Structures are given as C-alpha cells and as structure tokens.
Image (cartoon, rainbow, N blue to C red):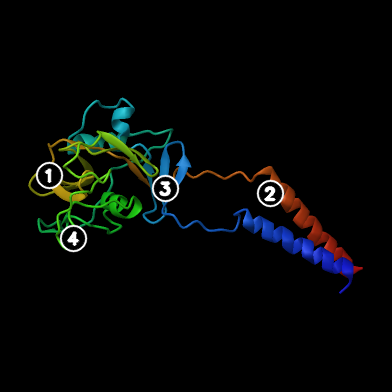
Amino acid sequence: MSKISRKVNIMLFALMALLCGMGYSVTAQAALYDRGNGMIYDDVLKITWLQDANYAVTSGATTSIMTHAEANTWATNLNYKGITGWRLPSAVPVNGTSFSSTTANDGSADNGYNITRPNCELSYMYYVNLGLIGRFTTAGVSLTKYGLNGLGTQFSQPATTDVGLIKNLRCNPGTTYWYSESIAGGNAMSFSFRSGNESFIGEVSSGIAWAVHDGDVGAAPVPIPAAAWLLGSGLMGLIGARRRFFRA
C-alpha cells in the first residue's frame, strides 16, 4: 500500500471516529425523552406524556380538581398544539381480567405500593421513570421520607413540584391522579404522587387529570448541525478519492 493510500485510509477512519464521538451512532438508554413543545416520550411504554402534569389547571381549562368522569372527558376532548386523541393513563389488573381489593406492599396487587408493572402507567412513572420512593417498603416497613420531595407526611410539601423532566406534579394531601379505568361499585383506579399508593376511590371523588397519548406524537426530525454536514461531505470526498486511487 502506497503512502498516499495509507493517508487516505487514516483520514477516513479519523473522520468516522469523530462522527461517532459527536454522538451520531450512540443509542440513548434513558426511558424518557423531551420532545419539546411540552411533550415527553416514554420509549418503554410507547406513550407521550404532557410535560405539565397539572396542565388542566395551568391551561385554564379548570380551576379545581375533577371527578373521574370530568377527568376522562377533559382528556378525551383535549387538543394540545393541534394534537388530539389524548386519554388518561391506563392500569391493567394484575390478573389481567378484573381489579381486586387485595392490598400489598410488594407490587403484587392492584392496590398498594411498589407497583412497577409497565401496564400501570402512573405507578410505573413514579417508581421506575422518576425513581421515587413509596411510603412502605416491599417488606411493609413504614418510611418517614418518601414521595415527590422525599419529605413524607411529617413535613409540609408544596402544592406542585418538578421532578426530572416532569413539571407541576401535584402532591397536595387528599389529591390523587386518575387512571382511566372504572371498577364495579362506582369506583375508579387512582394513584397518589404524594405517597406512591395505587388504589381505587369513588368516581365522584376529587382527582387530577394528566393526559397521555399512544405513540411518539411529539417526535420531530432532528436537524443535523452544519459541522456534521461538512464532516459528512469530507467523508464522502475521501471515499471517492480512495476509489479513484484504486481504479487508477
């Protein structure tokens, strides 16, 4: 191999390494992605969350928390930046067919703490995506520091707080987030971001609506910086030069 050929190969490999170093071939491992415009994508659940977990209030749609029926109606009718088809988060019974009143602390029941099943979207957000701690351990030990701020009930918590990419999560005493599912007896599934408890409460109780959407509806093409175009042009030029050299 001639000196010219070796130089072409060295420059070609250097450019490829540089492009890799800039992150164009690195696969991100995080579960939540900020799509901009107030939308967060979960690549495990394959759903898009409104970044503002209290959007129903901050948008002026309501000045208070809602019943289960009101929350479902709000989410169904939501038009966010021209996108429709929103819903409340979903929960699936642990047995796959019907919800049970059985309570457990190890995540093995429909009611209780430490539920990390992906098909319980609010609980999954709390424990897995946000890495928050519930009021009880899986062994049933009561903790004094838990919840959105790790403060527990012995300290006053703000009405709303930001955690990671999520904004305005509500943790007021007595308020829970609604799941979309209703259950027999006039109840509906709910989740408390104050304590990490999933449970069912009366459908006419007061709760919070947080809209989600199936799929990556906030996705947009990521523009490649000008520097990358220049590097790519140089790379193609070197490949062409290398081919011409060997044909000569």
Q: CA distance from mark 1 to mark 2?
A: 54 Å
Chain-order first, disc 1 or disc 4: 4
Q: Which image quadrant is residue 18 in? A: bottom right
Q: Secondary structure at mark 1?
A: strand
Q: CA distance from mark 1 to mark 3?
A: 28 Å
Q: Secondary structure at mark 3?
A: strand
Which residue in the protein does label 2 denote? 228
Chain-order first, disc 2 or disc 3: 3
Query: Residue 62, position in %: x, y?
Result: 26, 27
- For the residue pair 216 and 112, the one nearer the viewer reads as 112
Q: Amino acid at mark 2?
A: Ala
Identity of the residue drawn at 82% across and 63% down: 8
Numbered tag placed on residue 201 in the rendering: 1
Q: Secondary structure at mark 4?
A: loop
Q: Quadrant of the C terminus?
A: bottom right
Task: Name the side, left or right, on which 248 lies relative to 37.
Answer: right
Which residue in the protein does label 3 denote? 41
Task: Name the side, left or right, on which 231 lies relative to 186.
Answer: right
Query: Residue 69, position in %: x, y?
Result: 19, 37
Query: Residue 82, position in %: x, y?
Result: 43, 33
Nearer the camera: disc 1 or disc 4 = 1
In the image, residue 173 sits, relative to residue 115, either above or below, namely above
- For the residue pair 189 and 27, the one nearer the viewer reads as 27
Q: Secondary structure at mark 2?
A: helix
Q: Are marks 4 and 2 in contact (CB under 8 Å)?
A: no
Chain-order first, disc 1 or disc 2: 1
Task: Name the side, left or right, on which 187 lies relative to 117.
Answer: left
Q: CA distance from mark 4 to mark 2?
A: 52 Å
Q: CA distance from mark 2 to mark 3?
A: 26 Å
Q: Amino acid at mark 1?
A: Ile
Nearer the camera: disc 4 or disc 2 = 2
